[in-house]
Image: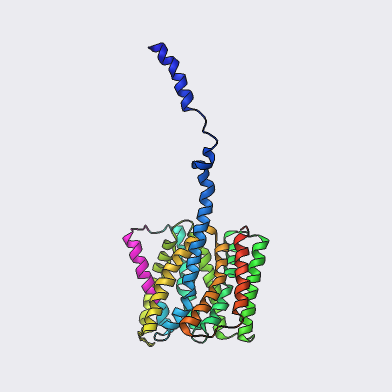
Amino acid sequence: MTAQDSATRPRRIAVTEAPVPATSTTTGPAATPTAAPHSARRTGTLMAALGVTAFSLTFPSTAWGLEGIGPWSLVTLRGVLSALIAGGCLLALRVPVPHRRHWAGLAVVGAGVVVGFPLLTTLALQTSTTAHAAVVVGLLPLTTAVLSALRTGARPSRMFWTAALVGAAAVIAFTVQQSGGALSTADLYLFGALLICAAGYTEGGRLAREMPGWQVIGWGLMLCLPLNAVGAVLALQHESFQLTGHSTAGLLYSAIGSQFLGLVVWYRGMAAIGVPKASQLQLAQPLLTLVWSVFLLGEHLPVAAPVTAAAVLVCIAVTQRARG
């Protein structure tokens, strides 16, 4: 029995330690690391595109909200409503408080996308059409890419920068042609909104690599809740407030669809494909907003819009293929 055991033991070991067949390298677990990044990029691009679609309705919904609600009341109320939804989700899922090192970045997110951008664009839309504002804000992708490169050390390729600059040039040419070459107070509000929103996007995209995207915007909203709550109480005492069909829909969409759900998928997309590439998808946002402005607000669609659309879509394709 002992001799037989000692004789069979090596053969069992040999069978156990036999090399894996070569075919398993393409169908087994070894193939997963190659396939996973590609799948993650596709999902990230889809998430970012959904965010852009949600953002494209922000200006039309704001214009609807302004029909019955004052600008300061609209901005602060949307911030309060968004924070209540985000806080409910954070509480229900028992999400732990972020680490101390994350709060500075969350403050930038709050200042940029929760307070600054909504306030400045809402003030601009008091005297500007949604079509004009949408085209000016079309410079946001390039602004975000520049700030991201400065903040995170990203170094996109020359092809990426060339396509981004061409897309920005198309947007600027469209803006100048529509405004007659003169900048208004609304344009100054919009350019200020570009800078502060790009900073919020950059920090949010960076933080979304360390925590889920919905938590990034959720904690940013919670951080700004006291400010928005006090602002809402003060604004409602001095501004008109009338809930019509349009103003109610505008307030609810800007709070839920744009400021919360849109930013959730947007930050998730940026975390997957990178801030510079995700930001270039926003080149399509002003063109989508132009379409919504025609169907929802009855605004006139500029003749130059199709030409700008073609140029911008080509730039999007190039930036998405360029190596970041």
- 103, above or below 56, in the image: above
The answer to which of 296 and 164 lies nearer the viewer is 296
Q: Give the range drawn in magenta.
A: 77-96
Q: Residue furthest left?
A: 92
Identify the image quadrant of the C terminus. Answer: bottom right
Q: Is residue 302 magenta?
A: no
Residue positioned 35% across, 80% down in the render: 233
Rendering coords of residue 146 (x, y %): 60, 66
Main secondary structure type of the part rendered in magenta: helix
Rendering coords of residue 241 (x, y %): 36, 86
Q: Does the magenta stretch include residue 87?
A: yes
The answer to which of 271 and 216 lies nearer the viewer is 271
20 to the left or right of 224: right
- 153, above or below 251, in the image: above
251 to the left or right of 316: left
Q: Residue 148 lies in what quarter of the image?
A: bottom right
- 37, above or below 26, in the image: below
Q: Residue 222 lies in what quarter of the image?
A: bottom left
Rendering coords of residue 198 (x, y %): 54, 69
Q: Can residue 287 be seen in this view?
A: yes
Residue positioned 46% across, 60% down in the render: 102
The answer to which of 125 and 37 lies nearer the viewer is 37
Rendering coords of residue 239 (x, y %): 39, 87
